[in-house]
Image (cartoon, rainbow, N blue to C red):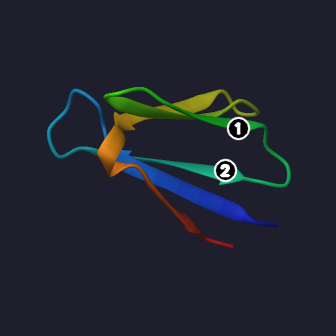
Amino acid sequence: MTKLLYSGLKHGETDVEVKILVDIQNDWFEVTHTKEVSQVMNKSTGKYIIVKRNTLKFEVVS
């Protein structure tokens, strides 16, 4: 199983980091961008994060 951990600074907050884990083999997920924010939605679990666009990053965790 390959999992990605997306993280970034929460939109509208100061220095609050939020994270979401996505299993790219089993989850249905979507990443969208606007001028100001990026949103990562794990549609399989119903969880999502909205972060300042220039702070979105991801790492492979397994």
- Which residue reaches farthest bottom? 62
Residue 40 position (above or below residue 2): above
Left or right: residue 12 compared with residue 59: left
Which is closer to the viewer, label 1 or label 2?
A: 1
- Which residue reaches farthest left? 14
Quarter containing the C terminus? bottom right
Q: Say if mark 1 contacts mark 2, CB within 8 Å.
A: yes
Residue that appears at 70% across and 33% down: 45
**Local SS, label 1:** strand
Separation of residues labelled 1 and 2 (CA atoms): 7 Å
Please tell me which of labels 1 and 2 falls first in the chain: 2
Give the class, few, some or many, for how many residues have Cα within 10 Å of label 2's Cα (few <14, many ≥20).
Answer: many
**Local SS, label 2:** strand
Residue type, label 2 = Val
Number of on-image labels? 2
Reading the image, the residue beneath label 1 is 29
Left or right: residue 40 compared with residue 16: right
Residue 44 position (above or below residue 20): above
Residue that appears at 76% across and 66% down: 2
Residue 20: percent from the left, percent from the top?
A: 53, 47
Quarter containing the N terminus? bottom right
Residue type, label 1 = Phe
Residue that appears at 76% across and 33% down: 44
Residue 41: percent from the left, percent from the top?
A: 60, 33
Residue 53: percent from the left, percent from the top?
A: 35, 39
Q: Quadrant of residue 60?
A: bottom right
Left or right: residue 61 compared with residue 51: right
Reading the image, the residue beneath label 2 is 22
Residue 8: percent from the left, percent from the top?
A: 36, 48
Q: Quadrant of residue 48?
A: top right
